[in-house]
Structures are given as structure tokens and as C-alpha cells.
Image: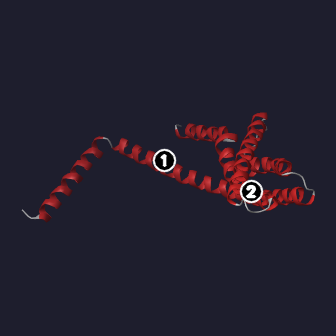
């Protein structure tokens, strides 16, 4: 027997098996195909939604970061407030802007809820303490031979970067998490009809 004959016979057997399966249960094959197509499309839509959220969060973040960075530098270098007071004051002001902009534009939450405000404030506080609490000692250990002003300015820049990443994760998966569940459950309800 030749290899070509074996391959052709194997292919014919598979086609015959598939054909008999489709004859026996054509509706199941079609339903499974549609189900897999829905899952694939939902995955693509989830990726697109995440990309849009990251893009909106980034645009709002750039505006907010420029505002916050300007304020923190003025508070620290011009008004000579200490590191923690300067950065905290800046973040309180920026957080008010960030809450409303991200709620409406990034995560598209329309309802007003005290729960969102509390979760947002908690998220900001945790991200702030982690970001600046890590940045300052880390920069101090690396740049120990520099002046306190340089160390704290570099720590402010590093803390800002850490804060941005932690803040997006916190808003996406903690603050506005329930909003995504409502969308998914309503989509699932539509599919079952």
C-alpha cells in the first residue's frame, strides 16, 4: 500500500464519520458552531473594550497626571510643603477630576452610587500609600548621595508611575467591577432568548 492511498483512505474515513455525525445531529453541530462563534466574538469584543478603556484611561490620565504633577511640584518646590502634604493635596484634587471623568468616559457608569465613591476613595488611598510609600524609600536607597530635594523629586516621578498602574487595576477590577457583571449578565440573558 502506498502512503498516498493510506492518507486518502484516512481522509475519506474522517469525512464519512463527520458526514454521518452531521446527518444524525445537524442542529447540534450548528448550535455548537454558533456557540463557539459567539464565544470568539465576545472575546474579540472584550479585547476591544479593554483597549478602549485603557485608551480612555490613558487620555484622562495624561490630563490628570499633568495637572497633578504641576500641582505637586508647585506645592513642594514653590510653597515648600513637605513631601506627604504636597503629594496628598495634589492627589485629592486630581482624584475628584479622575473619578468623574473615568466613571463617565472610561468605564461608562451612568448611575450614581455612594458605593462607587467609597470604593474609589479607598482605591485612591491604597494606591497612593503603596506608590509613594514604595517610591520614596526605594529612590532614597538608590540615590542616597543626592540631596533630599532631588531624592524626593525623583520619588514623586516614580510614585506617579506606580500610582497610574495600580489605579487602573483598582478601578477596573474593584471600583467599577460590579458594572461589568451587570453588562455580562444582560448579554447572557439576550443570548438565551
Q: Are marks 2 and 1 in contact (CB under 8 Å)?
A: no
Q: Nearer the viewer, residue 172 or 90?
A: 90
> Which residue lies at the image location 82% right of the left edge and 48% below the top edge?
84
Q: Is residue 84 above or below residue 69?
A: above
> Which residue lies at the image location 72% right of the left edge and 55% below the top edge?
140
Q: Which residue is mark 2?
A: 155
Count of marks overlaid on the render: 2
Q: Secondary structure at mark 1?
A: helix
Label 1 packing within 10 angstroms: few (<14), some (14-19), many (20+): few
Q: Secondary structure at mark 2?
A: helix
The quadrant of the image that shows the N terminus is bottom left
Residue 74 image label:
none
Left or right: 13, with 110 as reference point: left
Left or right: 4, with 164 as reference point: left
Q: Nearer the viewer, residue 115 or 95?
A: 95
Q: Nearer the viewer, residue 83 or 175?
A: 83
Residue 39 image label:
1
Amino acid at each position: 500500500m502506498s502512503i498516498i492511498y493510506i492518507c486518502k483512505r484516512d481522509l475519506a474515513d474522517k469525512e464519512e464519520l463527520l458526514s454521518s455525525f452531521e446527518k444524525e445531529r445537524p442542529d447540534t453541530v450548528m448550535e455548537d458552531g454558533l456557540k463557539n462563534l459567539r464565544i470568539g466574538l465576545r472575546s474579540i469584543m472584550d479585547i476591544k473594550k479593554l483597549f478602549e478603556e485603557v485608551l480612555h484611561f490613558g487620555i484622562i490620565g495624561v490630563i490628570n497626571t499633568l495637572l497633578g504633577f504641576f500641582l505637586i511640584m508647585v506645592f513642594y518646590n514653590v510653597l515648600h510643603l513637605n513631601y506627604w502634604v504636597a503629594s496628598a493635596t495634589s492627589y485629592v484634587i486630581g482624584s475628584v477630576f479622575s473619578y468623574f471623568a473615568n466613571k463617565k468616559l472610561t468605564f461608562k457608569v451612568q448611575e450614581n452610587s455612594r458605593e462607587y465613591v467609597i470604593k474609589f476613595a479607598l482605591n485612591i488611598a491604597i494606591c497612593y500609600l503603596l506608590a509613594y510609600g514604595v517610591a520614596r524609600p526605594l529612590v532614597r536607597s538608590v540615590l542616597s548621595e543626592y540631596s533630599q530635594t532631588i531624592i524626593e523629586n525623583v520619588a514623586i516621578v516614580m510614585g506617579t508611575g506606580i500610582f497610574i498602574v495600580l489605579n487602573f487595576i483598582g478601578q477596573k477590577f474593584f471600583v467599577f467591577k460590579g458594572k461589568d457583571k451587570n453588562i455580562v449578565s444582560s448579554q447572557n440573558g439576550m443570548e438565551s432568548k
